Amino acid sequence: MTTAMGLIDPFIHYGFMRRALVATFVLGCSAGPVGVLLLLRRMTLVGDAMSHAVLPGAATGFLIAGGLSLPAMGLGGLIAGLGVSVLSGLVSRKTVLREDASFASFYLTSLAFGVLIVSLKGSNIDLLHVLFGTILSVDQNAITLVGLISSVSLIILALIYRPLVTECFDPGFLRAVSGKGQHYHLLFLFLVVINLVAGFQTLGTLMAVGMMTLPAIVARLWTRTLPRMMMTAAFVAALSGLSGLLFSFYLAVASGPAIILSASMFYGLSLVFAPQGIFAGKGLRKRKVSPHP
């Protein structure tokens, strides 16, 4: 009974803890499923690159608004992220460079430029807030915007679920049948960018991608069907948010890194105990993911 009360006491007595919990739950609902598709497309490192690529836009919005304004930072990050996505695609089609190389080039430039913007016009504290977020200062407006982004993401996923899944497993077939494979790819990158935008104030630009990739990897170790994998990823993301906030509150540590480390803890446990973990199936036999329940 005492343990149970210890788990809920911070959320009963402190409004900022309740708002932070709601923000992480809502973010996990969309970031988890998007992360699963990112994982199946073998684009997890591209997602990490994009989280760095949006930094100049987020930093510009931060300075224009004079602080942590999620709408201003979100708009700037959205423009920067989509710009990097389009430019990377153009470079990969017009040159011999692959898309991952293009993303790497642009994200390194964007990261350096974003840090430079904040360092020239802001303080070290401002830089830390942009890079690592301040989830405990999330207000009602930020929660509303995160909820809107999450809802839009889930609606788009539902509308284009089949083409996205087809592109994951057989991109050549989708291009041959409809000729719109590139359109769906760009739309998926849009989903990645807006979910990174949603993670700005909660986890910062450097760690926002962690809410996508780590829960998706955990889900991959526990399930074999795509719908279950998406639901498991969303659940793990929410559970990581809850446990990370509790660790942050009782151990007096930064909340953003605590949430990501909580997800890392679930990953470590899954490596040992999951049906498709280290000790499963006598060796490194890989099992295919099924798109059906």
Image (cartoon, grey):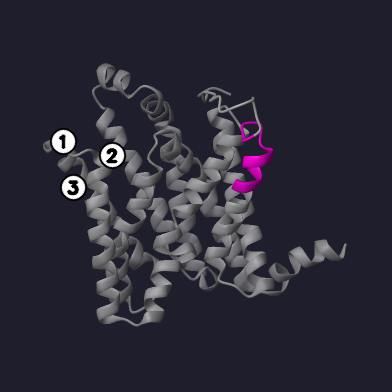
State the image coordinates of residue 20 (x, y, percent, origin top left).
Answer: 57, 65
Callouts 3 and 2 close, C-beta under 8 Å: no
* Residues in magenta, as a range: 267-278
Q: Amino acid at mark 3?
A: Leu
Is 285 situated above or below 219? above
Q: Which of 163 and 48 lies nearest the eye of the viewer? A: 48
Indicate the secondary structure of the residue bearing disc 1.
helix
Q: Is residue 212 left or right of residue 100?
A: right
Residue contact at pointers 2 and 1, CB within 8 angstroms: no
Q: Residue at x 52, y 65 (%)?
A: 256
Q: Which residue is disc 2 drawn over?
A: 186
Q: Is residue 190 above or below residue 2?
A: above
N-term-proximal mark, 3 vs 2? 3
Q: Which residue is pictured at 55% across the width and 35% down the height?
A: 220
Mark 1 crowd level (few <14, some 14–19, many ≥20, 10 Å Cα): few
Q: Nearer the viewer, mark 2 or mark 1?
A: 1
Give the number of the disc on residue 87: 3
Question: Quarter-wise, where is residue 279 in the image?
Answer: top right
* Disc 3: CA contacts within 10 A as few (<14), some (14-19) or many (>=20): some
Is residue 175 at all visible to an observer of this figure?
yes
Q: Residue at x 44, y 57 (%)?
A: 208
Quadrant location of the C terminus?
A: top right
Work out whether mark 1 precedes mark 3 in sequence or the reverse, and give the earlier one.
3
Magenta stretch: residue 249 in it? Answer: no
* Place of residue 280 in the rendered image (x, y in percent of width and height, measured from the top left): 65, 29
Q: What's under tag 1, amino acid-wise?
A: Arg
Q: Which residue is mark 1?
A: 93
Q: Report the number of numbered marks.
A: 3
Q: CA distance from mark 3 to mark 2?
A: 12 Å
